[in-house]
Image (cartoon, helix red, strand yellow):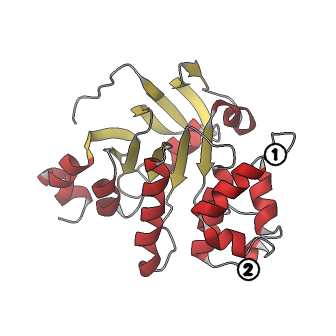
């Protein structure tokens, strides 16, 4: 495993994290960091604990030990409705929209902690995802998979988070929509939002990100620049299909 390093200016700092569900421990001593504006991807085999890392950061698992800090403040053990106040947005893989609500209502739910939904935030989301403006009165449950994913991302961006966490954003999308989804994530990052992403399409994710982590059995196995991991023969043979 490459040595885990930080420049001391990490936005997100996960150290020696142990976490799981109930009494079942999934993560053991996981270290991870995201710098301001960085694009970081977590890859690994099924059951490696990738989604559990994301859920643990966002307060959705049983925190068992270690540290999770965001902008030098501990968020370990906090509930999701507390964590969003710190500037994190999270898009789960499944059930990530309110199907019975309209597109606009879903977006407004993303800003529920505010006294009033800022029109400029809605305008920004509509500029990023024009289809959402066109379909703003449509029930989210009637939208295509790609449109629902854009809506889920848009809702998470309503509070203009410093860090956007995405769990398998390309899952279930038609092949011709996957590249478009990655392009949209690239643009979100290029606009200044840091991204932490779990992704099944490991090669494409590593090609686009700044850094990547490979998790195996709930533990760190490799960490390096995305291009370096793609070029690493062991990583390619064991986790990227050669």
Assign a secondary structure to mark 2.
Answer: helix
Q: Residue 29 vs residue 208: left or right?
A: right
Residue count near mark 2 (Cα–Cα under 10 Å), binned few <14, some 14–19, many ≥20: few
Percent position of residue 64, x then y: 56, 28
Percent position of residue 4, x then y: 29, 29
Q: Residue 157 vs residue 217: left or right?
A: right
Name the one closer to the observer, 224 or 241. 224
**Can you say which quadrant of the picture contains the C terminus?**
bottom left
Q: Residue 137 vs residue 222: left or right?
A: right
Question: Which badge, 1 or 2, comes first in the chain's sequence?
Answer: 1
Q: Is residue 181 above or below residue 79?
A: below
Name the one closer to the observer, 89 or 192. 192
**Can you say which quadrant of the picture contains the N terminus?**
top left
Q: Is residue 147 above or below residue 52?
A: below
Residue at image location 25% in from the left, 61% down from the top:
240
Q: Is residue 14 above or below residue 53?
A: above
* Mark sitting on residue 112: 1
Residue at image location 81% in from the left, 69% down from the top:
102
Name the one closer to the observer, 159 or 203. 159
Q: Quadrant of residue 153?
A: bottom right
Q: Can residue 94 be seen by looking at this rendering?
A: no
Q: CA distance from mark 1 to mark 2?
A: 23 Å
Percent position of residue 161, x then y: 61, 40
Residue at image location 47% in from the left, 67% down from the top:
181
Residue count near mark 1 (Cα–Cα under 10 Å), binned few <14, some 14–19, many ≥20: few
Name the one closer to the observer, 234 or 224. 224
Percent position of residue 233, x then y: 12, 53
* Badge 1 vs badge 2, beta-carbon distance below 8 Å: no
Q: Quadrant of residue 127?
A: bottom right
Task: Name the residue tied to disc 2.
Answer: 142
Q: Quadrant of residue 103?
A: bottom right
Assign a secondary structure to mark 1.
Answer: loop
């Amino acid at each position: 495993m490459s040595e885990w390093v930080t420049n001391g200016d990490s936005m997100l700092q996960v150290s020696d994290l142990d976490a799981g569900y109930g009494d079942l421990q999934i993560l053991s001593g996981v270290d991870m960091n995201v710098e301001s504006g960085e694009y970081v991807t977590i890859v690994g085999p099924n059951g490696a604990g990738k989604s559990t890392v994301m859920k643990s950061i966002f307060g959705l698992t049983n925190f068992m030990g270690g540290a999770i800090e965001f902008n030098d403040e501990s968020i370990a053990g906090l509930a999701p409705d507390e964590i969003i106040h710190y500037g994190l947005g999270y898009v789960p893989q499944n059930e990530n929209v309110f199907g019975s609500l309209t597109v606009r209502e879903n977006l407004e739910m993303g800003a529920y902690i505010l006294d009033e939904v800022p029109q400029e935030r809605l305008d920004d989301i509509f500029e990023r995802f024009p289809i959402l403006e066109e379909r703003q009165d449509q029930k989210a449950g009637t939208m295509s998979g790609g449109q629902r994913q854009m809506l889920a991302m848009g809702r998470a961006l309503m509070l203009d988070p410093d860090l956007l966490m995405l769990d398998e954003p390309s899952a279930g999308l038609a092949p011709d929509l996957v590249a478009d989804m990655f392009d949209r994530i690239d643009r979100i990052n290029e606009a200044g939002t840091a991204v932490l992403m779990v992704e099944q399409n490991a090669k494409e994710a590593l090609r686009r990100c700044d850094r990547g982590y490979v998790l195996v059995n709930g533990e760190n196995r490799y960490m390096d620049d995305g291009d370096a991991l793609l070029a690493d023969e062991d990583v390619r043979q064991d986790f990227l299909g050669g």
